[in-house]
Structures are given as C-alpha cells and as structure tokens.
Image (spheres, rainbow, N blue to C red):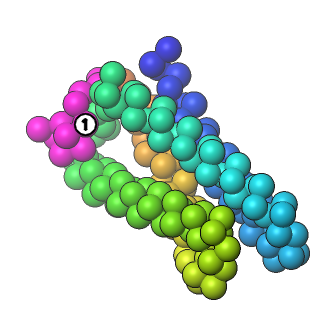
Amino acid sequence: MYNVMPTISTSFIVISAIFVAIGWVLIAQRKIEAHKKVMTTAGVFASLFFIFYLSRTVFVGNTLFDGPEHTKVFYLIFLLFHIVLATVGGIMGIITLRWGYKNQLDKHRRIGPWTSIIWFLTAITGVTVYYLLYIKYPGGHTAPVWRAIFGY
C-alpha cells in the first residue's frame, strides 16, 4: 500500500490545482457560489494530499533520491524550493479561504491570485519531485524526513 501512496498524494495535489484553475474561471465569470464550492473542493483535495503525505512520512519515511550523485545537490535544492512553496502556499491557502468564508473580500481578492500562482507552482514542482523519485530514478529507499531532505 505504501508504494501507491506517493501516486495518490501527488494526484490529490494535481486535482487541487485543477480545481483552483476552474475557480479562477468561475470568479472571472462572476459565478460566486460556484467559485466558493470549487475552491472549497480544491482545499479538500489539498488537505487530502497533506494527510496522505504526512501519514507516509510518519509511518514509512520519505524516499531518498536515487539518481546520479552529481545531480543530487540540484535535486535537493529543487526539493527545498518545493517545500518552501508548499508551506507558503498552504498557509496562504488557509488564509485566503478563511477570508473568503468570512466575507473579508477585499483581503481575499488581494491575496487570492498570489495564492493560486504559488499553488500552481507547488503542484508543478511536486509532480516534478514525484517524477524524479518514482519514474526517472526509481529505487530509492525510504528514510526519516531529515535524512531524505538533507542527506544525513
């Protein structure tokens, strides 16, 4: 089961980004209720990603990079960039949704586009990390999160 978890969690983040894109279109069309529902769905899929990712990290560990040694430093820099994006995007997503639900629409409108852009970048870099770990260079073993990220 733990072998399929990265595929499932990556799928959730991609689905979340697709719903964010749909939400952009809906708000541009002034379909506010549909926008709310779609963005809530995006938040649900992002939460499912986080639950799957955290569960795998806690119970199994993270997958070590198994590509060529001379590319490892580039992968680790890219991974850290992705982690920062995901953290910032997640926090901004919570704030953006909260302001939308509380009808603080001036704040919601200011931060929403930035949140979406960061979320798209998070999804793209997340899929890239998945590709490098499970498709391009499969075979890495699992290890505690700090060892997987920093190599020790």
Count how many numbered circles sit on residues in the image: 1
Q: Where is residue 62 in the image (x, y as percent from the top left)?
A: 32, 32
Residue 65 versus residue 141 in the image, above or below: below
Residue 102: image x %, image y %?
63, 69
- In the image, is 115 to the left or to the right of 72? right
Dot 1, crowdedness within 10 Å: few (<14), some or many (≥20)?
A: some
Farthest top residue in view: 1
Q: Can residue 45 be seen in this view?
A: yes
Horizontal side, residue 144 vs residue 78: left or right: left
Residue at image location 53% in from the left, 40% down from the top:
49
In which quarter of the view is residue 36 placed? bottom right
Q: Is residue 37 magenta?
A: no
**Residue extending farthest left:** 152
Q: Which residue is drawn at 79% across and 64% down?
A: 35
Tell me which residue sits at (47%, 57%) in the image: 90
Q: Nearer the viewer, residue 45 or 117?
A: 45
Give, as a single range, the part of the protein colored magenta.
141-152
User: Does residue 74 appear to the left or right of 103 in the view shown?
Assistant: left
Q: Which amino acid does label 1 sit on?
A: Val
Q: Residue at x 87, y 69 (%)?
A: 31
Q: In which quarter of the image is residue 44?
A: top right
Tell me the residue that label 1 is attached to. Answer: 145
Q: Is residue 141 left or right of residue 114?
A: left
